[in-house]
Structure formats: structure tokens, C-alpha cells
Image (cartoon, helix red, strand yellow):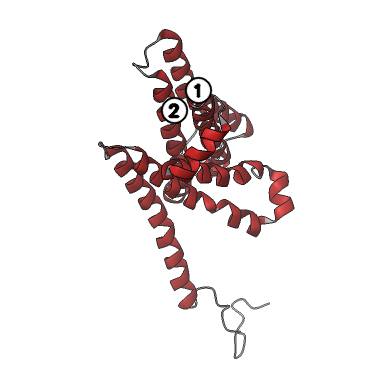
């Protein structure tokens, strides 16, 4: 049986990834089923658009949750699932945009351009998805080698900005019930606050000399065991 702190074998990790892949598809399958069965309410297009947007934000938060879980549980292998979660966030974001461009606006690019210009919540949403594109394109091991670890990490830290923009997009979208945006914003701030706290702890350790080399030994060397 696999312990939480035990690194899964290659076969076990493959099984975990397949299970996660299937689980991440469930929201899309349920929306498709609801559309076919006409159970999405009076405005199914709005229901699909809203749900795909919420799942984009959820997957962003789940992706951000991986590092705290790894740090506090010792399950370092969770990092190997983060790429898939991030790609699913991008996939649901693209679906969210397509629902608006296709089902809502019917590819009326002039009207879409006016909407992006005049309605701030759409502008913020488009900017957030545009920032997600380079993260999706550089999610491969080859991209990491090409960019170098430091540059790749710097690029992928833009997920923090993307998550905040997603929250702003949600706040400006709703008109009355702000419980959803409030919840997602609070979770985002907690996850980002944890990272800020970790960086501050790291800075303090460096200031206190935690990473200084120990001074060279001085004096005579005394043998513990005689020859």
C-alpha cells in the first residue's frame, strides 16, 4: 500500500496521473450531459460560460495549493502533478473564452472588440488568459531546458498575477451575490500570503547567516583513535 510520504513508483505515478486526468474531465462531461439533457436552466449558454470560468479559477487555486501540500505533508511527488493541473486550468480558460466568442457572440469580432474595450471584466479576463498562454506553451521539459530553470520559474510565477486577475474578473462580473468572488479571493490571498511568508523566512535566515560557510578549523588536530 502506498504511504503518503512514499514516492510512488513509475507505474503508480502513471496510475495517479490517469486518475487525475479523468477526474479533471468530470466538470466538462457533466456540462455536456446537462446540455444534452436540457438541465442547465433557462439560459444554458450562460450556465456553461459561468461554470467553465469558475473551474478555470478552481484549477488555478488547486495548482497553487500543490506547493503548500508538498511542503507540509512531505509528499514531494505532488509536484509531478502540478503541470497537468495547470494545463487543465488553461483548457477550461480557453473553453470559457470560446463559450463567449462562439455561443454568445457568434464570432462577431467587431462586437467582441467593443466588448473587450468597454466592459472591464471582459478585458481583465482576456488579459488573464493571454498571460496563461506562455505558461501552457512552456510546460514541457524541453522548454525548461531551453529557458533555464531560473528564467522558467520567473515566467511561471506569473500564475500569481493570473489568479488575482481571475478574482477581479469574477468580482466585476457578478452583480449581487459576491459570496463566490469573496471565497476565491480569500483562498487566493491565503495561498499567495503563504509564499510571501516563506520568502520572508528565507530572507531572515540569510540575514542571520544560516547559509554562511563555517569558519575553518584552527589549532591542533587530536586523533581520537591511535594507529
Indicate the secondary structure of the residue bearing disc 2.
helix
Vertical relation: 155 (above or below) 225: above
Left or right: 16 with respect to 177?
Answer: right
Report the residue at 55% width, 37% height from top: 90
Residue drawn at point x = 67 percent, y = 42 percent: 140
Q: CA distance from mark 2 to mark 1?
A: 9 Å
Can residue 5 be seen here? The reply is no
Answer whether labels 2 and 1 touch (C-beta < 8 Å). yes
Mark 1 residue element: helix
Q: Is residue 30 above or below residue 66?
A: above
Q: Is residue 214 visible?
A: yes
Q: Nearer the viewer, residue 186 or 131?
A: 131
Quarter the C terminus occupies: bottom right
Q: Give me the disc on residue 103.
A: 1
- Within 10 Å of the Cα at label 2, are there few (<14), some (14-19), or many (20+) other Cα atoms? many
User: Which comes sooner in the sequence, label 2 or label 1?
Assistant: 2
Residue 214: x percent and y percent? 56, 79
User: Is 84 displayed left or right of 124 in the figure?
Assistant: right
Q: Which numbered tag is attached to residue 49?
A: 2
Amino acid at each position: 500500500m502506498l504511504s503518503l510520504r512514499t514516492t510512488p513508483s513509475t507505474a503508480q505515478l502513471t496510475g495517479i496521473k490517469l486518475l487525475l486526468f479523468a477526474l479533471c474531465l468530470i466538470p466538462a462531461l457533466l456540462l455536456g450531459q446537462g446540455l444534452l439533457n436540457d438541465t442547465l436552466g433557462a439560459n444554458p449558454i450562460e450556465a456553461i460560460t459561468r461554470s467553465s470560468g469558475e473551474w478555470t479559477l478552481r484549477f488555478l487555486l488547486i495548482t497553487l495549493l500543490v506547493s503548500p501540500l508538498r511542503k507540509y505533508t512531505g509528499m514531494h511527488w505532488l509536484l509531478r502533478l502540478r503541470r497537468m493541473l495547470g494545463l487543465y486550468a488553461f483548457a477550461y480558460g480557453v473553453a470559457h473564452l470560446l463559450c463567449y466568442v462562439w455561443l454568445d457572440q457568434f464570432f462577431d469580432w467587431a462586437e467582441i472588440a467593443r466588448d473587450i474595450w468597454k466592459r472591464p471584466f471582459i478585458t481583465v479576463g482576456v488579459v488573464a488568459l493571454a498571460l496563461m498562454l506562455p505558461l501552457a506553451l512552456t510546460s514541457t521539459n524541453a522548454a525548461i531546458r531551453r529557458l533555464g530553470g531560473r528564467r522558467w520559474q520567473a515566467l511561471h510565477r506569473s500564475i500569481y498575477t493570473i489568479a488575482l486577475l481571475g478574482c477581479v474578473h469574477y468580482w466585476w462580473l457578478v452583480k449581487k451575490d459576491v459570496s463566490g468572488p469573496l471565497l476565491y479571493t480569500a483562498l487566493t490571498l491565503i495561498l499567495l500570503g503563504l509564499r510571501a511568508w516563506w520568502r520572508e523566512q528565507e530572507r531572515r535566515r540569510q540575514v542571520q547567516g544560516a547559509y554562511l560557510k563555517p569558519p575553518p578549523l584552527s589549532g591542533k588536530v587530536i586523533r581520537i583513535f591511535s594507529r
